[in-house]
Image (tube, coloured by chain):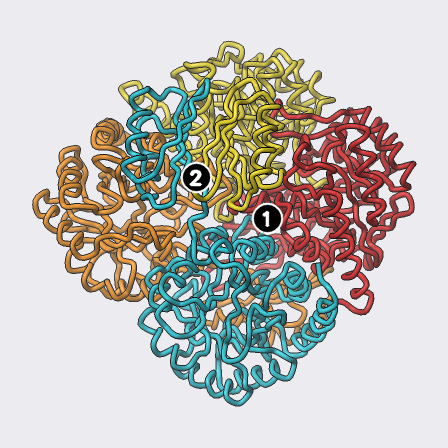
Chain colours: A orange, B cyan, C yellow, D red
Amino acid sequence: MIINMSAEATEEEINHVIERVKECDYQAHVSRGTERTIIGAVGSGGRRNEIEALRAAPGVEDIIPITQPFKLVSQQVKHGRTIVDVRGVKIGDSDLIVMAGPCSVESRDQLFETARAVKAAGADMLRGGAYKPRTSPYDFQGLGIEALEWLKEASEETGLPVVTEVMSEADVEIVAKYADMLQVGARNMQNFSLLRRVATVNLPILLKRGPSATVKEWLLAAEYLLAGGNPNVVLCERGIRTFETGTRNTLDLAGLALARELSHLPVIADPSHGTGVRSLIPAMSSAAVGAGADGLMIEVHPCPERALSDGPQSLDIPGFAQLMQSLRQRARTFAGGAV
Amino acid sequence: MIINMSAEATEEEINHVIERVKECDYQAHVSRGTERTIIGAVGSGGRRNEIEALRAAPGVEDIIPITQPFKLVSQQVKHGRTIVDVRGVKIGDSDLIVMAGPCSVESRDQLFETARAVKAAGADMLRGGAYKPRTSPYDFQGLGIEALEWLKEASEETGLPVVTEVMSEADVEIVAKYADMLQVGARNMQNFSLLRRVATVNLPILLKRGPSATVKEWLLAAEYLLAGGNPNVVLCERGIRTFETGTRNTLDLAGLALARELSHLPVIADPSHGTGVRSLIPAMSSAAVGAGADGLMIEVHPCPERALSDGPQSLDIPGFAQLMQSLRQRARTFAGGAV
Amino acid sequence: MIINMSAEATEEEINHVIERVKECDYQAHVSRGTERTIIGAVGSGGRRNEIEALRAAPGVEDIIPITQPFKLVSQQVKHGRTIVDVRGVKIGDSDLIVMAGPCSVESRDQLFETARAVKAAGADMLRGGAYKPRTSPYDFQGLGIEALEWLKEASEETGLPVVTEVMSEADVEIVAKYADMLQVGARNMQNFSLLRRVATVNLPILLKRGPSATVKEWLLAAEYLLAGGNPNVVLCERGIRTFETGTRNTLDLAGLALARELSHLPVIADPSHGTGVRSLIPAMSSAAVGAGADGLMIEVHPCPERALSDGPQSLDIPGFAQLMQSLRQRARTFAGGAV
Amino acid sequence: MIINMSAEATEEEINHVIERVKECDYQAHVSRGTERTIIGAVGSGGRRNEIEALRAAPGVEDIIPITQPFKLVSQQVKHGRTIVDVRGVKIGDSDLIVMAGPCSVESRDQLFETARAVKAAGADMLRGGAYKPRTSPYDFQGLGIEALEWLKEASEETGLPVVTEVMSEADVEIVAKYADMLQVGARNMQNFSLLRRVATVNLPILLKRGPSATVKEWLLAAEYLLAGGNPNVVLCERGIRTFETGTRNTLDLAGLALARELSHLPVIADPSHGTGVRSLIPAMSSAAVGAGADGLMIEVHPCPERALSDGPQSLDIPGFAQLMQSLRQRARTFAGGAV
């Protein structure tokens, strides 16, 4: 770390910082310029937190970290890419994986109709919400266990592994009984209690990026999972919050590409939440593939205008079939040599 | 709600929407303009969610909600302001309430030294973290129960009621044994499982605004608490995430003023997290008072440069005493007639 | 427009608004609900501005515009897509157009070396800055007319039409003498005096999106150009400003797709400024193509580490050649059937 | 500056950078850690730009600037605060300066009625737009010279100096004939041609912060004015663009306080544009005073519902009088000793 002393720092203040650096088991490399003094805290075994706290010491203007704070998720630790296996579906391998299904499970019929249709259209996994995080307490909150049971049944019938969100530590055990992959939703990306809990489950995790999380914070949230013992983590970019109101969120595909560059974990995109606008989903699916996404998560509903959540961003069944056809053509090309 | 049909909508599509509006127990007021048709869904007992889903119906361009989605927290439901009583400290009354203490409880000595000092300087409540949400799994995570016990002791000695964060449903019971007020942190503002759980506790709640939450979403999170049976809610503005990097967050005092205008709940400000910069805390405390804040939450540490969290935004003890003196002078004036 | 009266509006206030609506040459469609009254101002020939001002009238809670404020740039006015011809290069047609060259023209040699190389690699147009908007007055500000002369020469030698930025009304005449297309930079997107001036020039315009402009504001800036008499406008998405610091800007490809959906104008992407990170340019070029971009603008420098501006986001010559090769493979596929 | 070499940098790459640092007239202080090498470019006379370009050199991970890029506006250059004199009104002195008047000058009567009223209520300066930057080309664009003449007349009658916006280099001369202070609007904060032009005028400048400008960029825009020869610059915080939609902009009072800390220039606040909501103006005026603002700019209109621009954020005349009365009470207190 670099400690930037202010131009007005006294000799005493500088020496105090140098001593603290040594106390924290770093070497202190001191550069005295004409205007100010810079102190490098060099080493890798020292107490990083205590150096960071020196930002509050007299005469210190700024502390600049040099190395990234994440470790296990980093490309620098593990070269090569992680492949996450969800009951036989390999995410992070060369194939584009498509997870599709309704935002919320609303009824047995709605789920089965959708599951069969997305299977027929070529989806690899089934998504569907049993527990729904909703901005308003008066909105539909999901059907809970009943929905989990239907998901399991639909999975058995279609052969599609199921990914579904778990919102609460208390529900982890029950959801893990039915699902093949646990989703930690965007609003819970920094629910650290939940992260620690799902890290102990023997299932792969889909970790959505928080709407105001930087890529670095997202990777640190994943670090909680890996540090907690679960290496099977897939990241999902689902749009960040910006000033733009023409779309529900701003799908940050450069963030997706950056996460894939900094980390060895697979990264997928969710153009449904990422845009909130049905007509933009095909273009953004294709864009996500171009950006290097390992997969896509797409909301599909047999009758979007009657959806209890997120209808405006759900494709109907023919719309999804058409999207899959286009993506297959695209995918075939990629095999030939992509950017 | 207003349903804005697209200019290309067919007669059939328009009629379909009108029928759906009636099915949902609203009256349909139809305005046919030269360019397009607008349908008003009028009434208050109808199924709002189903109307919103019509955004996905053919021919619909947009659905525009007219009334606010929150109810119990709204000024329209309860005129006059709520006063929340935290073991005798009244928040929302005319006095400015100051909650002060360390970001994290790090040791018995550190806590007691701070508690006595903030009491002497005139603080009304003691804050201190026992469970800390930290971006990195490698950062200090709080001392847990031991810290809660010290907080209780310090509270008994000084007479200051204690507010402390609860991060997990599993911890609610234990934290509630020791604290006088439970804090739901910014990252958990939309952890709806946690909101539902704390709503059932017989203690006042401090609900921090999420870093990317709109004022409306913040009030809806509070609505979860009131709808869950807990009317004793204090809101806390602690800065939103913007592009500005000169401060850690952007303290949104207009958001604070707007929340006080839309709702009857008390609203306080946290200029420590709100700016992340110690030197700006006095100015922003004073600004918050000007904006109408019912109270302030301030981080104080006996030796900020050795703080295990948030040192750079913590006042030291003399700094806090000086701030309190200025605020008292300010407060005296307010008694005379404020803006 | 919809005028949403507050729940407390008096009969007198409602009648006052109804009268004003009629005075402004609109019809007033009144919906009286149980809770509040909604007034629709229906018609197309009325004085829209005066209705909007009623937001300030007593009893009015909100005014909600129904139709988009832009006209000439809209798909609703002109169906089918505009093709902009820049000295024979057709933007908006089926081919992907690539504009490449240095951020700033720094010397005759640097420009010619780059121009020949991008031509060889398959670029369609040459870019290069003669006048540079720089955040600091102490940064390199461009070589001005000398650079324009070299650009013209390089264009004649390579056959590539030239696009270059004009920053000031005073320079429009001189820049127009040398360039084939005028660029209005992101920081000047709402420099309305400049927009009005370039609208009168008989050259196509490249209008970059402002870093904090919504898609709607961007289209309204284009509307200034079309309303001013210049229909040859190409839009360029170059990243918006968000909280993410891992990239210089957030390339908003859904914004690009939305602009193409709302408008008939061609839209290109600038992944160099859009990311600010060289290693992300290939992925984001490919993503932009997937999102439907009509072209790309790429910064290329023979020796990025000696560039006087934007070196970190410039490709070197071999890097650009490699990018073009990948894009050609991609493009060939698109011919076969894209999403 | 600090040059952070990547962990994989070769000895050759490190040596290349060291040589370049010396070529640019800096000393190279090299810290070789166990994981990576850091090179400090130390000195004050070197070619900063060329060092920054090294970010593009092989083996370089990042370049971290240590000193602030602005000079003349900095507290480090001029200790003590600048007082800007606008025809006798001193901005930056202990008094709170209030500039008030209509958003746009719409008629002689409207202007004179407002000017007399704000004078009577205690305003110090008159504001009013003759040239208006408008998002849509179809909105009212201002009355131009006629409005300037009325402003001059109203100024002579009331004794209030006039501040008005200049949008175009071409208009600087004419506006300077009539105004006492030139305003550079938020959208033009980085219109560097305009900044260079107004820097040469012998009048004080009011420089509004751009809606997506960092405090640092704002100060660099002011640096253009000081470097261009005009030291009489007042900064104006008018809200930044964020995701919050409950207010038109987010008034960044911590940004105001930070600008006053980093710079010696006076800083005022514009709560009218800053919030866009009339009811929030008193609270945010008071908050701005608390944050240390040297003055306020307030929009006032005799009949906001008929205003041709910004009616919803304009106070009417009694509203302004009431605000001024509250501020006077507040101001009296400040004399006694503020935070």
Residue at left offset 88%, top offset 37%: D155
Closer-to-camera residue (D38/D148)? D148
SS at mark 2? Answer: loop
Task: Please tell me how crowded label 1 is: few (under 14), some (14-19), or many (20+) other residues with Cα within 10 Å.
Answer: many
Q: Quadrant of the C terminus of chain D?
A: bottom right
- Outermost residue, bottom side: B157
Lateral position of residue B24 relative to residue D302, left or right: left
In the image, residue A288 above or below residue B213 = above
Q: Give the residue number, with chain letter if any, for mark 1.
A: D250
The outermost residue toward the left is A157
Residue contact at pointers 2 and 1, CB within 8 angstroms: no
Disc 2: host chain? C
The residue furthest front is: C11
- Give the residue type at disc 1: Thr
Which label belongs to residue C33?
Answer: 2
So how many labels did they put on this image? 2
A201 shown above or below B321: above
Q: Secondary structure at mark 1?
A: loop
